Amino acid sequence: MDAPTSTEATTELLKRLLEILDEENALDRTGSKPVLEFVYPEDLQIIVCILSVLNLHLKRYYEKFNLQRKLLPIELTDEPASKEEIETVIRQTIRYSVKTFSPHFHNQLYAGIDEYGLAGSWLTDVLNTSQYTYEVAPVFTMMEQQVIEQSLKLVGYPPLPEGDGILCPGGSLSNMYGMVMARYKMIPDVKRKGLAGLPQLVCFTSEAGHYSITKGAHWLGLGTDNVYKVKCDEFGRMRPDDLQAGIAEVKRQGHLPFFVNATCGTTVLCSFDPLPEIAAICREENLWLHVDACLGGTLLLSEKYRDRLKGIELSNSVAWNPHKMLGAPLQCSLFLIKGKNTLHEANCVGARYLFQQDKHYDVSWDTGDKSLQCGRKVDGAKLWLMWKARGTKGLCESVEVAMSAVEYIPPSMRTQEETQEWWDKLYEITAKVKGRMMLEGTLMVGYTPLSYCNLGNFFRMVVTCQPPPSNASMDYVIDKIEELAADFEGCQEFVVGVASDNRNSTPRSRPSQPGIRLRSYPPPLRWLHLNVLCLILERLRLKNCTMHERKDQNESNLGFCELPSSEEDN
Ligand SMILES: Cc1ncc(COP(=O)(O)O)c(C=O)c1O
């Protein structure tokens, strides 16, 4: 690869990049290649140090022992790198990076990307521009507006201009927009005068809510002590009674409640807060209701699942990350709001060098002053291209495929007493299994403890729309974890399995009698079932309180559950 100096050279460079991506299987979706080739950071550091002092002799020695594959010349130098060095470094970057395209990557709330989203991302990178004015982003302005328009419709907000929105660099920022808007709406003077002389402002989020609310409290000068963490029920949903008690307490102390963040799809359990009850409290108390639907908002695309977010239309603002479950390329996050011109009023500063009012076109198309940022990536275009290529129907279909996989239930009949020792051992083994899967590079599933539920480590299995999951990729997870855990000392004590008699005593799936249909795995018993997550999921499913519920069943999907209907959801 030569440093590009002409249009042809740029085109050649990009073509070569595409070839390398192909040769290195960077876009492989089959799962036949490792998800990662793990190298400890200290090894990469050592390699870098060695490289910087390496004389030729040492280098040959290094290569003789076949260590050169580890060479990652990360050091930036005065002299330009050669064409070969650049190719090598690109290949090494691919080699040591995590292949989120793999069907065995379940580690985060994002995964592979929709190919049209990827094409959109490359397109916007090539056309490198900023979203702030129509002048520099005519097409992208239209696309952003269309994406906002359709998203307002999904949420059930009024259309533009009564509803509005903006693409943000991530869900944390979208949530912070909600906080800023709430504060501005309650105290418009805060924009000019700041917080001086005001009572202490307090915001509310659940103990399962995302930490960006706490960060927002710090950044907005409220202080993290002024985030009231509302208690959750055993399924991770905000308790309206505790919210009400919290508001009363905060008022009693002379503070000023102003903002409630409810979550649709909490980060760990994907629980959905009861929006209608929370909205009623907010209405009564005159509080801004923001819904963090960064994860769960994608379910709005499916008629079958959108009732999980029932009541979202009652809120004042919403954050939704298509870059999570839906598979839009990072970053793609929407902030949506009710109220004409509110976003602009709250955020505009009117810089005349950029937002001149006497331009030769209708300057209402210059949307940049609604934003906190000046320059802003044209993220809406990526989602627009995906949406255009798939149609709402196609997006809905991919959500339903993902949801059918997430409902996978491995057998989990517990036959041993769950003593504290049993749990402690389980928590310890979870981390060890994770370490092994990383070193082997065959699977990536995240794990976490959950203090408010009093739980130690468990695997947080995430299923997204891209790449589309299958029964085989779900089976792979269980088989892999079982394999990785098989030789732990004493693991037999902790193995819990599915004895056929247990299966027989489980409620069977019949349309008229809700219950769980378990996959008939033979003994030896399945490790994933030791995993607390599965136990939680099972309980959640029985109580029918998360996104994992399914109302109708595909009989051919052995291993998927059928769930009871609940008054709350219907
Ligand atoms: C529920 C929820 N809200 C917000 C965020 C923050 O999103 P981002 O990572 O795009 O800032 C996350 C991230 O995982 C999340 O789970």
Image (cartoon, grey):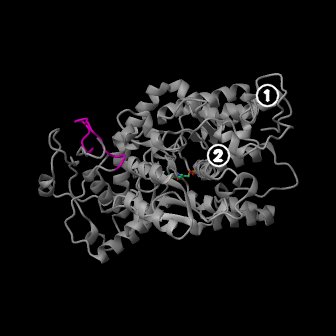
In this view, the residue in front, 368 or 408, is: 368
The magenta span reads 546-561
User: Which residue position is annotated with label 2?
Assistant: 169
- Tag shown at residue 135: 1
How far across and how far down the image is residue 395, in percent? 46, 31
Q: In the figure, is residue 369 to the left or right of 144?
A: right
Which secondary structure is most common in the magenta stretch?
loop
Does the segment drawn in magenta span residue 555? yes
Does the segment drawn in magenta span residue 162? no
Task: Report the residue that reaches farthest toward the bottom.
Answer: 421
How far across and how far down the image is residue 453, in percent? 38, 66
Mark 1 Cα-neighbour bin, 10 Å: few <14, some 14–19, many ≥20: some
Q: Amino acid at mark 2?
A: Pro
- The residue that appears at 55% across and 32% down in the rendered structure is 115
How far across and how far down the image is residue 74, in percent? 74, 56
Does residue 343 lie above or below 242 as drawn? above
In this view, the residue in front, 429 or 317, is: 317
* Earlier residue among tags 1 and 2: 1
Q: Amino acid at mark 1?
A: Glu
Instruction: Specify the quadrant that holds the C terminus.
Output: top left
